[in-house]
Amino acid sequence: MRIAFYAPLKPPDHPTPSGDRRMARLLMDALESGRHTPILASRFRSRDAEGDPDGRIEAAGAEEAKLCLATLKADPPAAWLTYHLYHKAPDWLGPPIARALGIPYIVAEASLAPKRATGPFARGHRAVADALNQAAAVLALSRLDMECLVPATRHLLHFPPFLDARPFDRPRRGDGTQLLAVGMMRADVKLRSYRLLAAAMTRIADRRWRLRIVGDGPARAEIEATFAPLGDRVQFLGAVAPEALPPIYAAADLVVWPAVDEAFGMALLEAQAAGTPVVAGGYGGVPEVIADGISGIVTPPGDVAAFAGAVASLLDDPARLRAMSQAARDHIRNRHGLPEAARRLDAILASVAR
């Protein structure tokens, strides 16, 4: 089937890397793996941190929807799939186009915060609620998100996040002391994660370890200063192209990331696919992507002492760390791999099309 695909927050071919862009690309890969043909319907970005109170973005979206509809009318797709819907980035295109073409409208990953029903984001909140009400299927990547979505749609399904594990299937090269953190360097929750990580590593400075950090951004100088007391035990690699990440994961023995307010953490999936166990803070959907005690350790959100203790426990137990390595690969292959996601998505599309 030909499937119209749209990501209002960030299109899959956007030049700036992020977890959103990565998951958008993976959804298109899952469609192709299921022998469907994804069509990038539009690159229109609806995100506005101010909430579009004057309706400017809504109006622009309506014009874009007219253009898309004119293009798609000649050969309508079998369904429309929108990825990542929330009050700051509502979908002004998919619902009206799907209605006009008489095709099913599907949403993958959405959030609907009741507190946004009033105030500057009321317009976006209402648009998300209307879209979810129209949707023939709403795929929730986290069970935590499902709590707020239940009242908004009758067609809610859990769809675990996933990745293509094949590029990460390579020999391991760690020596039992190599730690790795992967995260963008923004002055928001990412900075909070880095601060928690620095505090945790300071607590276990008596252990043998070296930490490599992959990431860049406007908060890099502040992050580097936070880790400065740890000296040359911390190495900053800067931004790394996605294709260069697999060997970096393979050289690490453990990925460490406090994951403050992460939806689920794509780097945590990548690490486990490479056979690298993880220690992560239990925010959001993070506990759903780690087999706690098997492929890694999930610690209470924001608990520096617990995080440091978990890292130290694995550094002190090389045999357990090695056992977790194979368990991490198995966990991704069995639950979060691309083939399994393609199978799930194909079944959903077949059901919706009927």
Image (tube, rainbow, N blue to C red):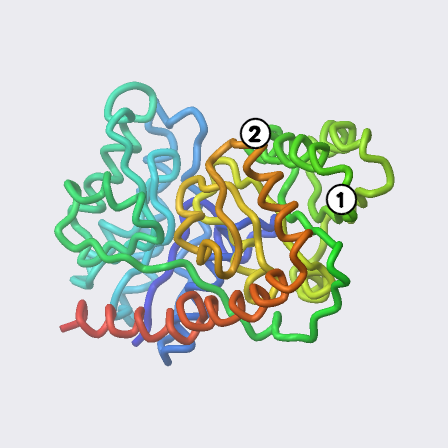
Number of numbered discs visible in the structure rendering:
2
Label 2, label 1: how many angstroms apart (C-alpha)?
A: 30 Å
The percent position of residue 306, horizontal first and vertical second, equals: 55, 37
The percent position of residue 158, horizontal first and vertical second, equals: 27, 57
Q: Residue at x 29, y 61 (%)?
A: 80
User: SS class of the residue under badge 2?
Assistant: loop
Say which mark, if any, is on residue 188.
2
Residue bearing mark 1: 207
Quadrant of the frame with the N terminus: bottom left
Taking depth in this image into account, of 173 and 208 the one nearest to the observer is 208
The percent position of residue 19, horizontal first and vertical second, equals: 52, 50
The type of residue carrying mark 1 is Arg
Left-right relation of 333 to 255:
left
- Which picture quadrant has residue 283? top left
The reply to whether dot 2 and dot 1 touch (C-beta < 8 Å) is no
The percent position of residue 293, horizontal first and vertical second, equals: 48, 55
Q: Residue at x 38, y 55 (%)?
A: 6
